[in-house]
Every structure is written in C-alpha cells, then in structure tokens.
Amino acid sequence: MLLSLMIFIPLLGMVVVLLLPRESEELVKRVTLLFTLIPLALAVYLFISYDRSTAGTQYVVNAPWIEAFNIQYHIGIDGLSVTLLLLTALLGPICVIASWRNIEKGIKAYMALFLLLETGMLGFFAALDLFLFYVFFELTLLPMYFLIGVWGGPRREYAAIKFFLYTLFGSVLMLVAMIAVYLNSNIVNGVAEGLRTFDIPTLITLAATQGHALADPDFQMWVFVGFFIGFAVKVPIFPFHTWLPDAHVEAPTAISVILAGILLKMGTYGLVRVNMAMFPQGLDHFTSGTGFWGNSLALLGFINIVYGSFCALAQTDFKKLVAYSSIGHMGFVILGLASGNANGITGAILQMFNHGVISAMLFLLVGVLYDRAHHREINGFGGLGTRMPIYTGITTLAFMASLGLPGLSGFVGEALSLLGAYDKFKFLTILSTIGIVVGAAYFLWTLQRVFLGTLNPKYEELPEINGREILTLVPLGILTIVLGVWPNFAIDMFRESVTNLIDVLNAI
Amino acid sequence: MQPLSNIESLLYFSPEILLVIFAAAVIILDLVVKNRESAAVAHLSLVGCLCTFAAVLFTHFSFGDEGPVSLFLGMIRLDVFSTFFKILLLLATTATILFSLRSEELDTRLKGEYYALLLAITLGMFLMASSTNLLMIFISLETVSLTSYILAGFLTHSPRSSEAAFKYITYGAVASGTMLFGLSLVFGMTGTGDLAQIAGRLTELLAAGDIAPLAVLIAITFVLAGVGYKIASVPFHMWSPDVYEGAPIPITAFLSVASKSAGFALFIRFFYTGFSASGLMEAVDWSFMLAIISALTMTVGNLAALPQQNVKRLLAYSSIAHGGYLLMGGVLLSSEGVGAILFYLVVYLFMNLGAFYVVVLVANEVGSEMIDGYRGLSSRAPLVAVAMMIFLFSLTGIPPFAGFFGKWILFTAVLEQGYYWLALVGLLNSVVSLYYYARIVKAMFFEDAGEETDRVSFSTGTFALLSVFVIPTIFIGFLNIFYTFSNISVSVMPMQ
C-alpha cells in the first residue's frame, strides 16, 4: 500500500497541477515540489524500514489486473530496487528546484509531465510483473519526448524524436522477447499445463526448473538478446548510444539530470532484474569468458569505458563532455555485471547509484554555468575560480568523485567492478583502466580550462552560485562523501539480493 | 437448430428493417423541411441509429436460450459475432453523423440523400457481418460498395471528390468481378452456397482427391481480391489514399473504420467458417499467403505515409498499415487471433475516429488539412492538441494507450502461431509509424503557430464528443470486459 502510494502520488500531483489556473506559476511550482517531497519521505521511510537481513521482496502488493491474460498488479521491493527508488525520489524534488527559474514557458505543462515521468520511473523500479514492468518502462517515453522536444535547446526536435525512435526500437524487441517468455511460461517437457504468467519471481523460479521450456539454453539465449537490446539502448551500450549526447545537450538541465541519473539506470536495472536473474544460461553464453561470444558482454563494457572516455576528451561543449563521460561510467556497470561474481555485481550496483548521484551533480553544475554565461564552450571560460569560489569548490568535488578519487563514492563502485571483472576477463579489465586515466585527464583538463588561469574579462561580473542552486547540490555532495568513506551504507541494502542473484547464476 | 423460415425470420431481422424505414423517412422528411440550414434530417438519422441499437440488443437477448439462429433459410446468421459487429458499426455511423453535423464542407442541398445513404450503407455492412451464404455475401458487399462510391463523390463542387468516386468505382468493379469469379469457382466445386456446408464438402473432395488443392487456392485468391479491396490490403489498396483524400472527412473516417470493420467481419466469417477445417488447412496452405499480404500491407502503408504532408492522406496510409496489423490476426485464423482482431477493431474505432474528428475540427477552424496547419495547435487549442496526441500515440501503440494493448494481443496471437518473422516485421513497422505520427505531434507542440496565434474556442458539445473518443482510447486496455467480450464473440462461431 505504502509503495503504491509512493508510485501514484506524483500521478495525483499531475492531475492537481493540471487543474490549477494557468496564471499562478508560483503555486504550480510549490504544489509540484510538495508532490515530489511526499515520495521522497516515503522512500526514506522504506529505505530505513527495509529488512536488510533477507533477499526476499518486501512491501508486496499482488492484485489481479487483466485476468484474461493472467496479468497482475504485482509490486514489491528488494535491496536493489529500494536503493534506486531512493535515488529517483531524491532527484525528484532536486529537479523541481533546479527548474524553478529557468523554465520560461508552459511551466504548468512542464511540471505535469515531470510528475508523470516520476510515476513511470518509480513504478518501473517497483514492478514485479513483466507486463507492468514494460508499461512503466514505456510510460517514461512520452513525458521525456515532450520535455526534450518542447523545452529543449535549438536542435530539440531532432534530439527528441531520435531519443523516442531509438528507445522504441529497443522496446519492441523487448516486447517480442517478453511475449515469447509469456507463451512458454506454462510449457513443461513440451506439454502445456496451467496458466501462463508474467510474474517475475515465478518466471525466475520456472527458468531454473529442469525440463521447463524457459530453462532451455537456446531459448534463454534468444530472449536474452531481445531484452538486452531493449535495455542496451537505454543504458546506453555501444553501438546504441548515439541518441544520448544529442538528448543531453538539447534537454533542459533538470531533464538531463533525470536522464543521466535515472533513465540510464533503468537499462542496467532491467539487465539485473530480467536478463541476469531470469536467463542465467543466456547470460552464461555471453559471459563465460571463452571464445568471442563468451567475452562479448565484457567487450561491450570495455568499449563503452574506453570509447566514451576518449569521446569525452575530444569535446569542447561542457554538457557533451559530461554526457560522454556517462557512457564511459556506465561501461563499468556492464563490466561489473559481466563478471557474475559478488564483487563485480556489488560494484556494478553501487556504481549505478553513485553515477546517478554524481552525474546529477555534474549536469546541475553545467546548468548553473549555462544559466549565467548562456554558452557551454569549455574554452570560452577561464579563471572562474577567482570569481566563483563556492561553485568551483563544488565542481571540483563532483569532478574528483567522477574521476574516481579514493575517498569519494565513484572510486568504490569502479574499483569493485574492476576487481570482480579481473577474475574472469583479465585482459579486458586491464585495458579498461585506460578509461580511468583518460577520465582523470579530461576532468582535470576541463578544471584547468574553466576555473584556472586568468579570468576572461567578459565574465568579471558573473554572479556566484546562489542559495537555491546550492540547495540542489548539497544533498548530492553529502552522499558522494558519505558513500566514499562508508560504502556499506548502501551495500548493506542489497548484499542479500546480490548473494541471492549469485546463487541463481551458480545454479546452472 | 434449424434455419428459420422467411416469415419467422422477420422478427430477428428488425434492426435491418428499422434501418430501411429510417432511410426512407429521412428522404421524406428532407422533402418536407424547407429550411436548408435545419439539422432535422441528421437528428432523425440519429434517432434511427438509436432505435436500431435497441433492436440489435432486443434480437440479441431474444434468441438467448435458443443459441445462435440462422435466418431466411440459412442466408444470414444471428450470433454474438454479428451482434458485436453491429454495435461497432452503429457506433461508427453515429459518430459519422455527428461529425457531418459539425463539418462545414458538406453541401447543404443534398442532406437528405447523404444521411439516407449513410443509413443504407450501414444496412449493407450489417449484412456483411452476418451473411453465411455466398450469394448473400456478394449482395451485401455490393450494397456497401455502391453506396460508398456515391458518398465518396459527395463534394459535388470538388474535382478531387469526383476523381475519388471515379477511381473507387473502377477499382471496385474489377475487385467485385474477380471476387464473383472466385465465388463461382467455390460454388462450382462444392455445389452449395452455404459456408458451413462448403467446408465439409471441400474437406471430403480434397480427401478423395476429386479436386486439386491448387483449384481451391485459386478460388481463395480471387475471393481475397474482393475482401482485400474492402480492407485495403496490398495489392488492392491503391484506391484508398486517393479516395480518402478526396472524400468528405466524415466519410473518410467512416470508410477507414466501418468499411474496414465490415470487411474483416466478412473475411473472418468466410475463412473461419468456410476454409479453416483441419483437413482443408493441411491440403491448401493459404495462411502463408495471408502472412505475406499482411507484412506487405503494413510495410507499404507505413513507408508511403512517411513523406505525406496532407493529414488526411497520411491517415489513409496509416489506415492501410492498420489493415496489415489486423490481418496478422487472420493468419491461421486461430481463435486467439480472431479475438485479437475484434479487440483491435474496437480500439481502432475510437482512436481512428477520434483522430479524424480532430481533422474535421482543424479543417473547420484553420481551414487546412496539411500538417503545417497544425503548427502551434498546442497553444491555440490545447485540449484538442492533447486529444490528437493521444490518438496518434495510441495508433503508434505506445503504452498506456489502448492501441498498445490492441497491438500486444495481436502480436501475442501471431507469436503463438510461431510466426516470429511476421511479429518482428509488425513491431518494426510500429517503430517506423512513430516517425510520421510524431511529425504531427511535433507540429502541434514543438513549432510556433506563426502569424495566427489567437486561441480557438470550441463548444462544449465538441469537447463532449471528443472525450467520447479520448476516454476509451486511454482506458479500454485496462478493463477486463473488452477482452472477455471479444473472446466470447469468437467462441460462438462454428469452426468446422
């Protein structure tokens, strides 16, 4: 009940916002803020009250929905989903505050769509029925399309439709795989018995049952590929990544934050929840460590890391640099997941959360600078450190966290991912560390070009970061430091879930 | 049970009889009313639809215990399947009358004929949905065709409309001729016009080796020409973009929904009852042919829609593509597939009619059918723009709108039959279709209106009618009852 409340309160907020008069913009913002703060409060409560000692799902609601197809409204949380729910609920109010001043037209529609987006994201992380999962997954598409297309930059129309087409392409392949799973869910030893189901926990059990159609290695391999492409577009994994730089550059600040912070995590979360847990034999085919296909997933992770980092190095647009760095950092998640051991998967999940926090900070910081200077050309600044010391300080923190400085959160996730991956993919892991070096290079180089040197005379009057903007950054900054020195704060949440997943993976 | 005699049948034939009575009454009223601006004729036809609806319900519930009945010595059949289609068709007719009331392009001098023809075409479609005899099938098809030629050419002052009617009639004549030839082959082989008997006879003859499977395949192909023409499937689709573009918008809406639905009703009844007996399916593999036609239809429709600038024409191609999706459910004719077709037709009715209603509104207020005319609609008429957005994304098949649920059931039925390639073609087609639907959305939401930026106001009645389409488009997929209803109506059909 609590969980359902959390998912649908933003939707209720959307209705309320739409009913408010067009003129009262302040009221619209405040109401939206309220309707994002309630899920945050609930998420914090869930995070605290979650029983860490078990891997089982908690706060489960299971009610029939479309009975003709045995589709259920089945939601619940485990350690992984509660962590990401907290991240989503946290970024909600932060993004509303970040949009307070710089959305000039149609604030009402903007906020309404944002609330719809939040419902989609929260629902996605809580869904335990494959059909429901898919519906929430797709529910994020429409608001995102409009948020980029209406409130975005100069090439917003192109970026919006590209985002939409890429994601839809991935989702339809996922849909085929999903229907295939459904159709095979009641076939044991070639004989159909009982009802078909979309229920994720049931499907996971069935897929591990000897003689069940879902347990067939070839079948698992094909549906693995179907789901994988769907999620890979979202992550994004090379070669499906080209929508991301466009979408990020054109989207307004708060939407970039959501895009990098949550939407990319939907891809990796799906990989863990569906691809790994449900199709361990399919996973094994691509991560066994032998032959080309056995190394393919790790290879994709490696390409993401190195290719993303080098692309970031070549950018002169601040926002594009951060976007490409996201591609690089998501590579560590893929590499960690491919390892299939406790270190790697823990690292990957931690990296998901950390990247959500750090990339959100980075995009907010880019937004702060853009609001003042109205451009993002890295070479067009210089010496801002003297003019905006607080801003420089926070940016340095975010950069250091992102490039993986020990003591800050980015380091722990990446280190664990690499540690796990080294067991299985020695060569690729060693090569992947190039990405860390390049990461340090582009962040430090950017730091130097923007903040050090002589102050560009154009920006002598540039105002310092204001209280509202600091308010959006402080919670994220605190999290990076806390998770850097006390990573178990998050790891404890999903330790049991990871152990459980490892058991599933080892059972084949 | 035994088919009812002609006299006994009349009671169960009351919906059709009422349609005839009201069509005649509309013409008489038109002669009496002198005021050309009066909407009395339209209102009378609305009353006609309402009475017919009551009669459909009456006949449905009055055969209750007796089960499905055959009327007029086995010419037509009254079952849940035909009731389902009758309700669907009546909804489409009612909506079309309401659209016509609001449309400004129709000639006020010819009102009586217009509405009388609308009722007449509905009668023809009722028969299409319930015929079980080859002769009756052909007659009902011709009734619908001839009436629609006139309706398509109803804009007497517009050359495009006349051209549309002429093209329609030329293609139509060829298609019905071909179909008639196919029907005569079937009759020649089996010696009966009754669909249920045809199935039995063909199975026997094929088993005994008295006729070659190829002969049956040829007959089926010829019949498909006639049916394919009605549902605008490749390669019999070429008339439809021109006709849809030239015809008055309410008629375009009507043809794209009602005509297609009736075509599918006929298609399902003909093949499901007559040609899907188990021995027959093994000897004559016509399902593969249908799969190819279905794949081609959606691909051609979607690709041709991509460059269109005229929204009406774009929707015409989109409607061809939707015919292709629907045909997927007809491949192999499993009961799941047919149920999926019925469900999709309900969804399609609401979303497609809704989209055409917005086209009517925009044509009235902005005076343009081109995509450019939709620029900045979100600031000029936000509710209408949002409604259009919902219809278009539902047509694409994006959750949470009903179109997604419709497509999902269709694809499930196709995958269940093991046609993986067809499902993939269909799904990739939905991705392609997003591009052209999104062009309209882009114009409405992402672009500025230019010089004309005044807000357009609409009457409460307009919004009420719009919500009749919007609300089901959002909610049908979430409700159990529609899935159940479309399944029941399939289950009562005799499959040989």
Image: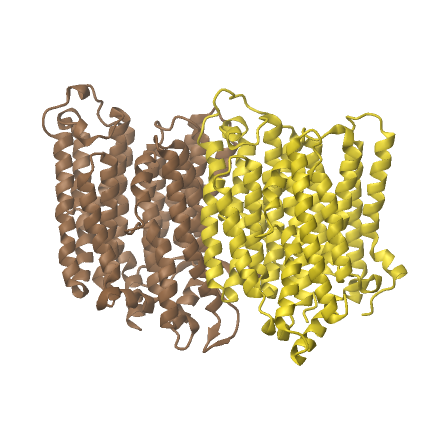
Chain colours: A brown, B yellow
| Residue that lies at the very extreme toward the right in this rendered image | B7
Quarter placement of the C terminus of chain B: bottom right
Q: Is B97 placed left or right of A169 in the picture? A: right
What is the x, y in percent for residue A308? 22, 47
| Residue that lies at the very extreme toward the left in this rendered image | A453
What is the x, y in percent for residue B123? 77, 49
| Residue that lies at the very extreme toward the bottom in this rendered image | B208
Q: Is B68 placed left or right of B402 in the picture? A: right
Quarter placement of the N terminus of chain B: bottom right
Say if residue B108 shows up in the picture: yes
Instruction: Please give the name of the residue rendered at 68% of the width and 56% of the height, measured from the top-left corner.
Output: B178
In this rendered view, identify the residue nearer to me: B182 or A28: B182
What is the count of numbered marks? 0
Instruction: Please give the name of the residue rendered at 55% of the width and 57% of the height, measured from the top-left corner.
Output: B293
> To which quarter of the image does residue B116 belong?
top right
Say if residue B478 shows up in the picture: no
In this rendered view, identify the residue nearer to me: A454 or B330: B330
What is the x, y in percent for residue A465? 23, 28
Q: Is A445 placed left or right of A355 in the picture? A: left
What is the x, y in percent for residue B30? 83, 33
Vertical arrangement, residue B313 with respect to residue A272, above or below: above
